[in-house]
Image (spheres, rainbow, N blue to C red):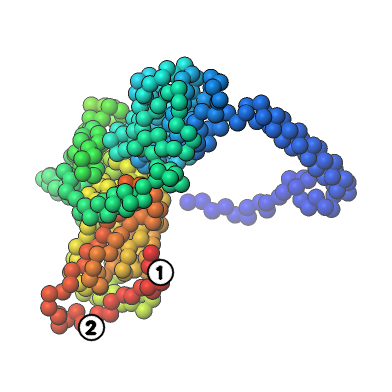
Amino acid sequence: MTVLEDPPAPTAPEGVRNSNSNGGGGLVFIAMAGILIALVASVVVIGLIGLLRDGGNGDGGDGDGGNGGDGASGPTTIGVTLSEFAIDGNLSAMPGDVSLLVTNNGSQQHNVVVRETGAATPMLNAGENATLALDALEAGSYELFCNVAGHAESGMIAPLEITETPAPAGEAAGAGTHDHTSPDFDADAMDKLMMDSMLAFPAETEGVGNQILDPEILPDGTKQFELTAAITKWEVSPGVIVDAWSYNGIVPGPMIKVDVGDTVRVIFNNETPMASDIHWHGLPVPNDQDGVSPYTQDMVESGGSFTYEFTLEEPMIAMYHAHMHSQISVPNGMFAAFIVGENPIPHGETISGITIPEDLVLAEEIPMVLNDAGVIGLTLNGKSFPATAPMVLQEGEWASVHYYNEGLTAHPMHLHGFPQLVYAKDGIPLDQPYWADTINVAPGERYSVLFQGSIPGVWVWHCHILTHVESDEGLFGMATAVIVEEAAATTEEGAAEEPPTEDASAEG
Ligand SMILES: [Cu+2]
């Protein structure tokens, strides 16, 4: 590590420094401002002329594109918005040249494909837009869908009607559209969808992620693991089965747990269609085991294998995932937890007046891996509500959770009922743990928390970006619950423990 001594003092370029002290600066400024005002005025006039000439045609705004022509057959632009998981817009136009101005208002990648013609936008990242020109569309019914695996099945499908009498702007064009200001907007139906979705929790699905992977113990004590990456079916929520990119067929992949001092060997077999590698995110490994092709190793081609080996001398709450093509393979499922050694709980410490019991024994310790993109989408441990697993505690029991964010955006994870003690960040124990009810977990981060299920009830536990948990179809995505069951009888020993309390006004 090198230390910069006496770094040069920052200097501002000439002219940037205090322009008022510069002799003729004021006059120059007034002249420049005058030119600028003239330029802006001329642009506004040109813009107005353009608008008048277009007659308001082809506005392409959110949900009110439609056909502005009065019998004229000029090009029509329809505004189409994408979200998880819906395609919205006033999806009708008269026959002729039609353009779709597609905006991705979601948090994941989406695109739009016209099933009948095969025309498609490029894959759009969150916030991006693209124009899709559909030349000379004849009258008829067309279907728009997102071709990210699983998204059409989740609701990203909508009819596009090309007819001589298009629906007036604002009228919903199909079941997939929801204009909350429209007279057709059915609040009762949405109430029912919300109740039905919430009462379906917890729902059964095939497959459980984070299962602990048993090593083969070699004669020299090395713990050998085998991971095979392949495209395998994964049920994200009831009936929603996607083509996941998985390790050993589960999402998140198998959890690796080893002891401090262990030598670990991992045989990686790549059966995905693209080259890959494994990066041990948060583990101190030799450079040639860091899993970043081509800098530290050759890429592991489709059908190939690579063996990693390293000795772990420090406790760590880490994870592993593909590095090469990670923007495809990681959101699609190639991520998992890796834990070395003992959980660094601050036994016996008093934090903000609450003492963590010296003899605390955890009733539960789980990874909670967040994702928000790819075919897996908005999920906790590879499942979308109502298929997310609740944590069940008996009154007074303590639990520890390691949040991992393998997604593309941050998620503020909020637990109702009791605060969470953040005691480690990225696996590094904090000298000053702190209590919080919402913990914002950015991509790549890990936060380890501790909480006591001190009050019986169903306490929801969710990402607080509201569109990550609710859609017009009800609750979904990054939500689950801690269910605290009432103690059957009064316990003698638990009475001394002061349960953490939370200001009721902070509830949300
Ligand atoms: Cu979120």
Q: Nearer the viewer, residue 90 or 82?
A: 90
The answer to whether any part of residue 314 appears in the image is no
Pick the quarter of the image with the C terminus: bottom left
Expressed as whole percent of the image width and height from the top left, the position of residue 261 reads 23, 54
Q: Is 388 placed left or right of 404 in the picture? A: left
What residue is pinned by disc 2?
Answer: 496
Amino acid type indicated by mark 1: Ala
Q: Nearer the viewer, residue 169 or 86?
A: 169
Expressed as whole percent of the image width and height from the top left, the position of residue 109 reads 39, 37
* Mark number displayed over residue 354: none
Is residue 429 depicted above or below 67 in this figure? Answer: below
What residue is pinned by disc 1?
Answer: 506
- N-terminal of the pair, mark 1 or mark 2, is 2
Task: Identify which residue is drawn at 42% across, 24% down.
Answer: 162
Q: Distance between the residues labelled 1 and 2?
A: 26 Å
Q: Which of 301 and 495 is in front in this view?
A: 495
